Amino acid sequence: MASATLLIDLQQILRAEHPDPFRVLGMHTVSIGGELRLVVRALLPGAERVWVADADGTDVAPMEQVHPDGFWEALLPRGTGSFPYRLRICWHGQDEPVLVADPFSFGPAISDFDLYLMGEGTHLRLWEVLGARVTEIDGVQGVRFAVWAPGARRVSVVGDFNLWDGRRNPMRGHPAQGVWEIFIPGLPDGTTYKYEILARDGSTLLKADPLAFMAELRPATSSRVFDLSRYAWSDTEWMETRREQDFCTVPMTVYEVHLGSWKRVPGDGDRPMTYREAAVELADYVTEMGFTHVELLPVMEHPYDPSWGYQVTGYYAPTSRFGTPDDFRWFVDHMHQRGIGVILDWVPAHFPKDAHALRRFDGTALYEHEDPRQGEHPDWGTHVFNFGRNEVRNFLVSNALYWLEEYHVDGLRVDAVASMLYLDYSRQPGQWIPNRYGGRENLDAIEFLQQLNAAVRDRYPGALMIAEESTAWPGVTQPPHLGGLGFHLKWNMGWMNDFLRFMHEEPIHRKYHFNLLTFSLMYAFSEKFVLPFSHDEVVHGKGSLINKMPGDAWQKAANLRLALGAMWSHPGKKLLFMGIELGQWQEWSENRSLDWHLLEDPLHAGLQRWMRDLNGLYRSDPAFWQTDFSHEGFEWIDFRDVEQSVLSFLRRSKETGDELLFVCNFTPMPRHAYHVGVPHAGRWREVLNSDAETYGGSNVGNGGVVETVPLAAHSRDQSLPLTLPPLGILVLRREREDGAGG
């Protein structure tokens, strides 16, 4: 211990400032009087006696405490070769010593190839390298920790297991890539931990693991070790079918759900359901209502309930509010076994400024931009990811693949895509920096989205990437190799805004706004669209959807039934936020359950029944969904009757050409003997009528069947003399001669 260099090392170790503790601690060869000997060094504050032992626990040499703060050293006997040693430690206050493997006896576990791919930004299974993984090395069980922190002078793993002492488990650095790692033997599953980071400016940061598989329940912020290797899936049939399925030509009606407020447990403090409880009840309900998928507001760990999950601090961890990661796997597994797909909302655009999370993770702007004109989001008070950094893109692309791989989810709805695409999004002149060509397009974000979607398309066929993109950006659903962003589907925000503006008008005024109703068909096939009535329309003072409708309670309900019918008949896949089908009067809140008691009212029960039957017809008739993305599946009958506010059109299936006729009356006036031109003579059956008494309507209709008459209308030789219900939609199907529909 006389070496001046070693004394400096010792002081740095004791101050937790050593840049390479593995060079000092553990087993090393030293020269003593020209003779090479093995020495073992360990930092063990609180130890009273320590021995170096072999793997069987046989003592090899006692250790000497060479510093009162717990620095121990043993010079091994002459002739001793390198071997897998253990430390036998008698801790203060304990009578019996314990035999442990020394973390500093293990070599690097991350390969050079992994490090190369991380630096290049192309490591697509990053969660298998970084984070905390329960593993076995050289026959020793433990946890391997690894984290990216290139700006750190030192990184340590801390937790209850080492009294949150950053001196005890400092990590090995890989300076070229900025990655730190350590294997800590004997840690059990569920261990709570964080990273203690010594920044370049001398400050000490305590950070949760960006790739932790589990986190503590809020308001606690630590990460937890979780072994992902134990769950046995039972959804093989679903996954194999999904792989071969063409989403364009199958039904897709999505029920958007916030797990914490869909349904609570009133007999247990009004708590939210667990993942497993919700899986059973939600699967029952979704099956009964006829939806094909559920889409969950973000389940990634987040500290702030009113963010609804959109301010993520744990990108690789399902929130602990409702259970463990395996509980969430069980949720997905159960949904799949019930024939229901699971889509997750995913937020790669921005992240919150919580001190324990990604913000200035290693004391530098690591995941974000340093310049606030690029790194700050003015609307949400969050940081924007630095998409131009290889490792950040790698973190996000790998995260998307992680949810598809480890949780078998069927798709990701990417939030706030427009905010990613435009450098001047919500910014005034002078508050943003143009790209290298002087434009407003975020070229790094475009490259990231193309890389992301290409990776998903290549590795997880059948999984869907869905863009919430609110502008007219071209090629959102074009494949990357054709210059598009590569999403499979895009939310049709234009249709939603125009349609809700139209429905908000008093019926007497709707004739002046018919362009809001019909304009969407000008661009309906320019992208592959999802029509959303999402959570965004029933929050922040916007009121509930039924309250957006004009009139008294009956008229509001009739308008909402009509709106849902018109939406379901419009080309495109469908998404509906929970509670809309109930006709909920209150604006949605994350703090309470949906108003299920409303179903005691026949008006609301009828609305729910309408949604169920509409889904049932939708799923059973390919005319609704087989040609959603082609003009061949849609044909106008009449969009010019603005005076009476009546709209009529056909939807057509691809394989058989069978047709459905839709006629919408957007006024509260019934229309009698209203002639609608049709392409085929014969009997047309009224298969659905939103004004039926069972749905809470006035029961105005056509008695089930209508016969064409040879009276020309709408440029067609045959027409149907229909009775149009007030504020209602009719769905009719031609009966073939064999009595079947067609």
Image (cartoon, helix red, strand yellow):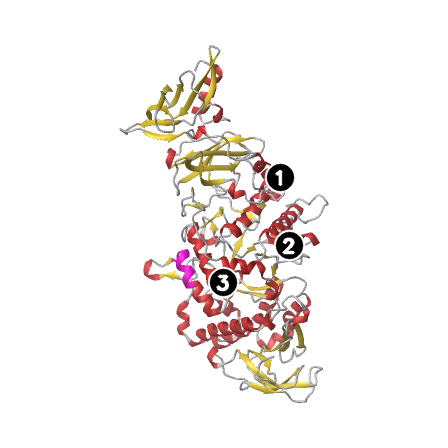
**What secondary structure characterizes most of the magenta part?**
helix
Q: Which residues are magenta?
A: 272-281
| Residue type, numbered disc 1 | Glu
Label for residue 486?
2
Along the polypeptide, which appears first: circle 3 or circle 2?
3
Depth check, front residue: 448 or 243: 243
Instruction: Tell me: 116 left or right of 107.
Output: right
Instruction: Tell me: 16 left or right of 445.
Output: left
Q: Which residue is the site of mark 1?
A: 120
Residue 349, x across and y down, in percent: 57, 49
| Residue type, numbered disc 2 | Gly
Q: Give the number of callouts.
A: 3
Along the polypeptide, which appears first: circle 3 or circle 1?
1
Along the polypeptide, which appears first: circle 1 or circle 2?
1
- Residue placed farthest to the bottom in the image? 710
Circle 3 crowding by C-alpha within 10 Å: few under 14, some 14–19, many from 20? many
Q: Work out how far the residue at label 3 is from the one at label 2, CA to CA, in angstroms.
A: 25 Å
Q: Which residue is the site of mark 3?
A: 340
Residue at the image position 45 percent from the left and 69 percent from the top? 288
Residue 316, placed above or below residue 662: above
Residue at the image position 58 percent from the left and 47 percent from the top? 397
Instruction: Tell me: 169 left or right of 741.
Output: left
Residue 2, placed above or below residue 274: above
Depth check, front residue: 163 or 283: 283
Quarter containing the C terminus: bottom right
| Residue type, numbered disc 3 | Ile
Residue at the image position 69 percent from the left and 84 percent from the top? 713
Q: What kind of element bears circle 2?
A: loop
Q: Work out how far the residue at label 3 is from the one at label 1, CA to CA, in angstroms.
A: 37 Å
Circle 2 crowding by C-alpha within 10 Å: few under 14, some 14–19, many from 20? many
**Can residue 199 be seen in the rendering of this structure?**
no
